[in-house]
Image (cartoon, coloured by chain):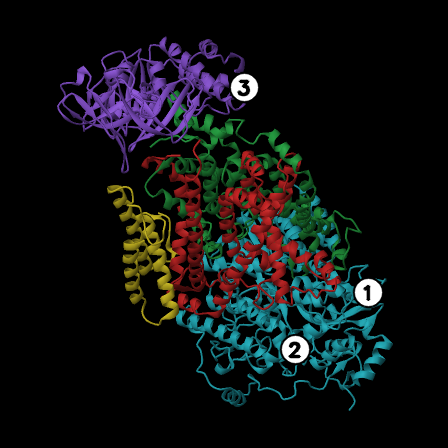
Chain colours: A purple, B green, C cyan, D yellow, E red
Amino acid sequence: MLELRNVSRTVGADKHIVDVSLKLERSTSNVLLGPTLSGKTSLMRLMAGLDAPTSGTVFMDGKDVTGMPVRRRNVAMVYQQFINYPTLTVYENIASPLRVAGKPQAEIDKAVKKAAELLKMAPYLDRTPLNLSGGQQQRTALARALVKNADLVLLDEPLANLDYKLREELREELPKIFAETGAIFVYATTEPHEALLLGGRTATLSQGRVTQFGDTTEVYRRPQDLLTARTFSDPPLNVIAVEKTGERFAGPGALSFSAPPSQLNLPDGRYHVGIRPHRLTLGHGAGAAPAGGSSSASFEATVTLTEVTGSETFIHADFGKERIVALVHGVRRVDAGDRVRLAFDPAHVLVFDERGTTAGAPTALAA
Amino acid sequence: MSAYEPSSHGEQRIPASSHSEAALGQRERAKTGHFRLKIFVPIFYILFLLIPIYWLISLSFKPNQEIVSGLTLWPQNFTLDNYRVIFNDPSWYETYYNSMLYVVMNMVISVAVALPAAYAFSRYRFLGDKHLFFWLLTNRMAPPAVFVLPFFQLYSAFGLIDTHFAVALAHCLFNVPLAVWILEGFMSGVPKEIDETAYIDGYSFPRFFGKIFMPLIASGIGVAAFFCFMFSWVELLIARTLTVTDAKPIAAAMTRTSSATGLDYGVLTAAGVLTIIPGAIVIWFVRNHIAKGFALGRV
Amino acid sequence: MKRMLLGSTALVAVALASGPAFAGMEEAKQFLDAEIGDMSSLSRAEQEQQMQWFIDAAQPFQGMDIKVVSETITTHEYESKVLAPAFTAITGIQVTHDLIGEGDVIEKLQTQMQSGENIYDAYINDSDLIGTHWRYKQVRDLSDWMEGEGKDVTDPMLDIDDFIGKSFTTAPDGKLYQLPDQQFANLYWFRYDWFNDETNKADFKEKYGYDLGVPVNWSAYEDIAEFFTGREIDGKQVYGHMDYGKKDPSLGWRFTDAWLSMAGNGDKGIPNGKPVDEWGIRVTDTDQPSGSCVARGGDTNGPAAVYSIAKYLDWLKAYAPPEAQGMTFSESGPVPAQGQIAQQIFWYTAFTADMVKEGIPVVNEDGSPKWRMAPSPHGVYWVEGMKLGYQDAGSWTLMNSTPVDRAKAAWLYAQFVVSKTVDVKKSHVGLTFIRESTIRDDSFTERAPKLGGLVEFYRSPARVQWTPTGTNVPDYPKLAQLWWQNIGDAASGSKTPQEAMDALCAAQEQVLARLERAGVQGDIGPKLNEEHDMDYWVEQAKANGTLAPQPMKENEKETPITISYDELVKSWQDSEASMPMKEGGMEATPASGDAMTKPAN
Amino acid sequence: MIDLSWMAWTWPTAIFFIVIFAMLAGMGAWEYLSPGGSPRTGILRFETTRGDRLFVSLLGSAFICLGWLWASELSLWYALIVCAAFVLLVFRTV
Amino acid sequence: MEKTWNNKAWFFVLPVLVLVAFSAVIPLMTVVNYSVQDTFGNNQFFWAGTDWFTQILTSSRFHDALWRNLMFSAIVLAIEVPLGIIVALSMPKKGVWVSVCLVLMALPLLIPWNVVGTIWQIFARTDIGLLGYTVSNLGINYNYGQNPFDAWVTVVVMDVWHWTSLVVLLAYAGLVSIPDAYYQAAKIDGASRWAVFRYIQLPKMGRVLLIAILLRFMDSFMIYTEPFVVTGGGPGSSTTFLSIDLVKMAVGQFDLGPAAAMSLIYFLIILLLSWVFYTIMTNVGADATSKRSPQ
């Protein structure tokens, strides 16, 4: 088990990591989710021992390893860039940690062959990394991480620089491959859906802080605050400022809807509601009556842009001062400047109080 | 914060985005019209460079009588006597060996001490690093004439006068900063994630440095060695002051061709030709490194 | 000459290599057989006696490794390649005789003087530094050395009085500070064949009204230069003068060596003018340098000095090949051998060997030279009793900072290369005479006709008028550097000769003042005079019976005088026959009127 | 102990070097105690740290002294006052 | 690349520091000591205060030589940098010819400086030198020993011959590091040759060119051996650069005090100018890095 206890790291005037405490269990898959510069890599480097924390302690299986140099820890790490030793062959690249550990040749050979087989690199063992495609290079790096049989495997956006197809392919394989090793598996990504696909547990990061850590679907469904919700939403979460009076929420324009049952007993006041883009549906034309009767709410917005991606359409629209994104099924043709009516089910909204803490979340399986 | 922007390193490793050979060829073909005309510039430039050198070589094969009695485009009385004088006299040819020896020693020392320093500059920030770097560069700026006497006294205090080591050490003054500068450029081109990967794999620093890192910057070492060779080989003032007979450089031996009995043009030019040869050989060996090395590093 | 040199080198090397490993008489005999033969002023028995002395004296230093250094001229090459290995074989002392450029020798010497670190165990440097050595007391005083510390390593057969350059290396205190190793003089050089050509003679006589011959004064030299310049001889344009003008240290020597003394700068006196020498530096009665500018009684910027600079510039521009302006001493030296130069005002006899090579344009088919050397002409300020030219005396110098045992071993080598055993042979190779006994050797009587007057000159009493820089110069290296800079300014026209010399003497006095301020040279160091105007000093000179500084002459173009070369040579021989050699005091220029010609009025 | 008498030491130059080394040591200590070098962009329009400001001060002072020697017969001590003012200026504005 | 703070890196720099301090700091301190004293040998020194500095700063020799030095550096940079760029632009980009060009072009860089001087001194002689002979046979009155203008031309041409290749090598290095995509884009945009140079090639070469300028400036400002061998600083003082005066003073006269003062002044001037170059260089370099487009 890896435990970070109140770990912080400050470089000069910059606070890279602020008071992070995490417990990662063995044989689990963990995702660090956050936008660029949120501190994922910094956190990984602290976990690996590449950097030492400014304050706080790191425990590995109950042992304090805070100042221990990386080479004395049993960790493996794969970077976003395809980092291999350019002057060594793929075989030697994969064998490298074993060679350093002084393993006998036969054992090395067996382990390398097995890892290469698993990562489909067997035909390329005699090449040097520079003669491989990006995907193959990253597979080599992954094989090296695998072969080491590390207690802690850190993958820092390993698929970000790959093209779509390779990414899909590897993403499926990765959890399986590392699941067998019994290691603590940590995977950093900027993409919420990648986190959802990987499952396991997720820690969301924002500005060097862990905003929430828990079961991935749980974090997604019930973010503890607005920050986490924003982090764990792609396309971006639509946030609208509303005012609760009695049983109804009233927003800008003519927006008004009744609070779902779980939020009825919230005190009156100002709130923010978060609506995930795919929860918005498109009504017809300006002034048309909202569909779905009292259980649904709707508002009118001005379209600024539509993007069609195969079977879905992104509609960007202005609603008052807010920018709204809706993800709707099918190919829709809406011209910029058109007024559209967007509808949602109040049962699916996230409600945050003024400090950003979650005041209410959907209870149903609404992810 | 470690936002890993894709380094140039990564870029070079992706064939699609780098200038592939095919694309280059295409460009050349597309410019064939230009190409014909353009080729004359380097040709004329190289001719301009070579004619004086030709003149030196041609003089070295003429007897003095022919040299001073007028202009002949090529040797009319071809002779090897000038070279014979040098190769038959140990006090001549040994100086040639002396020069090579201290130049090679200097190359080795300069690169050896510059490697860790360049690594530090390329990988870490530390107290006073920028000023230290500039201070190192300032050592190339000191006019050496006045420094030669302190040099002489310093090295004689250590009993090093007239040794190859003394010259090799003294030339470090201007070669080490240059080597650090060049190597730092090359090392900065290697992503530090490679270093970390190695540490994660369990490499100790020396082992990583020797096995992984040095091969990676081989071109940089080649270029640095080339420049060290160059500046040590052409330097005369310090080398002359620190040596007497046992380590006397060839360039210093050349002054003896001028004496109260006139200037021995033949031997002087022959010795001059001989001083060009080691340089030419060195360039030939590092030519690929130079082309490639310059492209990678920032020299 | 070079071929002969290399041949004998190879021979000796083979002979020595095959000999036994132990030093001793065997090797000495081999050396005498192979290298010396009868080319010596000593008999074989005496040679062996001298060698035996060297073997015995060197006994304590066997196996020692010493380094000595000299400039590169044929004589030193011979020493380095033949005599040094022979000495090593005979005595067991390992000698490295290093050859470097002359400037480098001085630089090494200065480095040793400045730092006190021993670089070479002995130096052969020009006796121009005698004033420097004497005043700084950094070199071993050889008179004391030979009587004291170095007594056991001083050859009883050395015969100091046999050295013709002894007076150059003796300081005013009467002590010998350096031991001459090679000497050569600056003489007038001309094309004997052209001067004796009937057409040339007739044309010259017609134009100038007097006979073409060896010019005795600058006035005649100028006429001859003008006469030949542009003249076509054997289908070639020729020049009436040769010199050099590149800004280079050797440009300075040209003036400190010869131009000023020939012009008549300074006072009378041999080897150097007293109290004002040819550099224009005045000394007090106690030999303390007291001024360089006329204002302090010196003569560096006096009329004679300015006149010499002006003539140098005029002639270089008007009568010398244009490329001469970009040449150094070493480059210009071989030019007359190309056959386009009619005469040169002074020319180093060190070039003799190169000028008598077969097949070059200035040598006849029978191997005799088409040229001759003769005394240089003198300028309008020159008077009898002054030095007339320069003679370089490369001499052994032992520094105080050299450890005594190393100095002893080096001293042995120094004596070996100037010993009577080897000196005749060495002189045949390098033609740089140092010993009276060698000059008188029969082998040179035989060889004289092939040497263009060299032997005749050295046998003549006139040769004492050719001397190096004297003892008035307290710091040769510092002062000599000032000359080429300042004369370079005059050469380019950025300063007039007078301005250049004013700047030069001021710079010299600045060095003198610094020496005075520091007081390093004690009671023989500089002590500058009060400044006065020129008249004051002229009056002083009159009162003291001296000459410098001479006031400006109204007519600097005096009556030209020439002399027939053959008459001149005869007069040298005559005086040799009639007068036994004495140091100094000789009437040098032939005065017999019938040999000289002046324009008929 | 190696003989260093050839270095021709004098008291004034020795004091000069002691002051320079003391300044460097002082800067080192300052930087150690409060790292970062307080970078800012002053009138030279690029970022300087206090190390850069020291360098500019020293180089500028050297030129002030040279200028003083060139232009004035007065004692160099006055130049030192100008230098001090200059250093103050540099640390304020650069 | 983000660098980590680590003061232990000093240990890596230590060997260089010790070595360079040994060869630089001790001699530099000695020179400072010399500069306030006078000496006549034997390691004896006499206090001279700031006399030497005053003497040199007020001497017209020094001012003239400094001015000539600045002129020379400016002329040489003005010729070598554009010429080097032009040659680099027209060099082949691949194939055996690259090696051939590089090797031939690097040749002059590896010739000892006194030999370079000797080559040109002989080459430019009107009687035995190919260049001088040809030029004067073309009817041009050329004599570098007599005419200051000819001497300057000779010295400048020699320096161009000697050092332009350094600029070529560096500029070429900058050029080959430009990805082909840039040219493709320019072609699609229909950019002119000049526009390609101005907006693609020149910015990409910026850094190496500044290095070339810095190196060339330092070396041309300290040039000694080559012009000394060719002209000896003449005719007159027309090609007497600071270093020629300095060497004459330091090595010829062994006037260590004045020479030390002069070299300190000289050093400070180079230091100032180099610092300006360096500051520009690093700031331009930093701009270039920050403007690098993220992928």
| Direction from residue D28 to residue E99 in the image, left or right | right
Q: Nearer the viewer, residue C356 or C207?
A: C207
Which residue bears the numbered disc 2?
A: C311
Q: Nearer the viewer, residue D73 or C555?
A: D73
Which residue bears the numbered disc 1?
A: C368
| Direction from residue E284 to residue C387 in the image, left or right | right
Residue type at numbered disc 2: Lys
Give the vertical position of B58 relative to A99 (above or below). below
Which residue bears the numbered disc 3?
A: A127
Task: Answer yes or no: are tags 1 and 3 on the same subunit.
Answer: no
Residue type at numbered disc 3: Arg
Q: Are marks 3 and 2 in contact (CB under 8 Å)?
A: no
Question: Could you tell me which secondary element the residue under label 3 belongs to?
Answer: loop
Q: What residue appears at the point 42 percent right and 60 percent down from the top-left corner?
A: E265
Task: Answer yes or no: are tags 3 and 2 on the same subunit.
Answer: no
- Nearer the N terminus, badge 1 or badge 2? 2
| Callout 3 crowding tier (Cα within 10 Å): few <14, some 14–19, many ≥20 | some
Q: Chain of mark 2?
A: C
Q: Chain of mark 3?
A: A
Q: Quadrant of residue E18?
A: top left
The picture places residue A265, in percent across and down from the top left corner, at 13, 19
Q: Nearer the viewer, mark 1 or mark 3?
A: 3
Gap between marks 1 and 3 measured at Cα = 81 Å
| Direction from residue E19 to residue A222 in the image, left or right | left
Q: Quadrant of residue A201?
A: top left
Q: Nearer the viewer, residue C77 or E287?
A: E287
Task: Answer yes or no: are tags 1 and 2 on the same subunit.
Answer: yes
Question: Could you tell me which secondary element the residue under label 1 belongs to?
Answer: loop
